[in-house]
Every structure is written in structure tokens, then in C-alpha cells.
């Protein structure tokens, strides 16, 4: 059985911290993963993140080593 990625959705505080640390507007932060500013605002206000969005956030803004591991797992499952 293939291993699943242990995605943990970032907390509201983490989302805000990631965005503010990069000095990005909501539109700038969410656009690379295909999320609108209004949806991003809802996630930052506490709406639960869907797992695919959490994975994309991890790939785009997470630590590079973790992104490399995740990409390797995704490629291996093709």
C-alpha cells in the first residue's frame, strides 16, 4: 500500500506568519497555488484547509527539504 503524505494543515496563525514574513498581500500569497484572495482570506480566518491546498502550501512555502521529499513521493507514485 502506498504511503500517504502526513499533511498537517497549518494553523491560522501559521498562515498569517508565513504571508507576513514574506511581506505579501493575500492575492500575492495565494495566487501561486490557484486560490483566490477571498478564499485565502477565509482560510486565514479559520476555515479548514482542504488537504490538496495544504499540500500545495507545503510545496510552495514549506521547507525545501520537505518539498523535495513530497515531490519524490508524488513522482514515485506515477
Image (cartoon, rainbow, N blue to C red):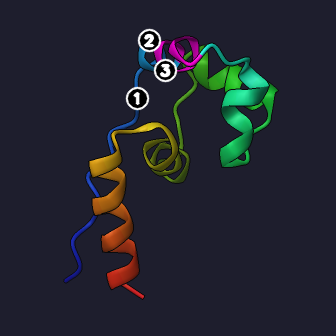
At 56% across and 11% down in the image, what residue appears?
A: 20
Residue 45 lies, in percent from the top left, at: 60, 13
At 80% across and 25% down in the image, what residue appears?
A: 38
Q: Nearer the viewer, residue 2 or 21?
A: 21
Q: Is residue 20 magenta?
A: yes
Query: Which residue is identified by label 1?
Result: 10
Up the image or down, 73 lies above or below 70; here it is below
Residue 77 lies, in percent from the top left, at: 35, 84
Q: Residues within 10 Å of mark 3 (few under 14, many from 20)?
A: some
Up the image or down, 21 lies above or below 32; here it is above
Q: Residues within 10 Å of mark 2 (few under 14, many from 20)?
A: few
Left or right: 56, with 41 as reference point: left
Q: Which mark is residue 18?
A: 3
Q: Nearer the viewer, residue 17 or 3?
A: 17
Left or right: 12, with 31 as reference point: left
Q: Please provide the residue range marked out in magenta.
A: 16-22
At 52% across and 45% down in the image, what residue appears?
A: 60
Amino acid at each position: 500500500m502506498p504511503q500517504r503524505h502526513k499533511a498537517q494543515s497549518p494553523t491560522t496563525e501559521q498562515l498569517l506568519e508565513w504571508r507576513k514574513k514574506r511581506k505579501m498581500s493575500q492575492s500575492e500569497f495565494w495566487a501561486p497555488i490557484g486560490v483566490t484572495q477571498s478564499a485565502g482570506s477565509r482560510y486565514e480566518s479559520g476555515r479548514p484547509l482542504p488537504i490538496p491546498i495544504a499540500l500545495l502550501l507545503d510545496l510552495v512555502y514549506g521547507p525545501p527539504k520537505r518539498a523535495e521529499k513530497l515531490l519524490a513521493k508524488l513522482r514515485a507514485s506515477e
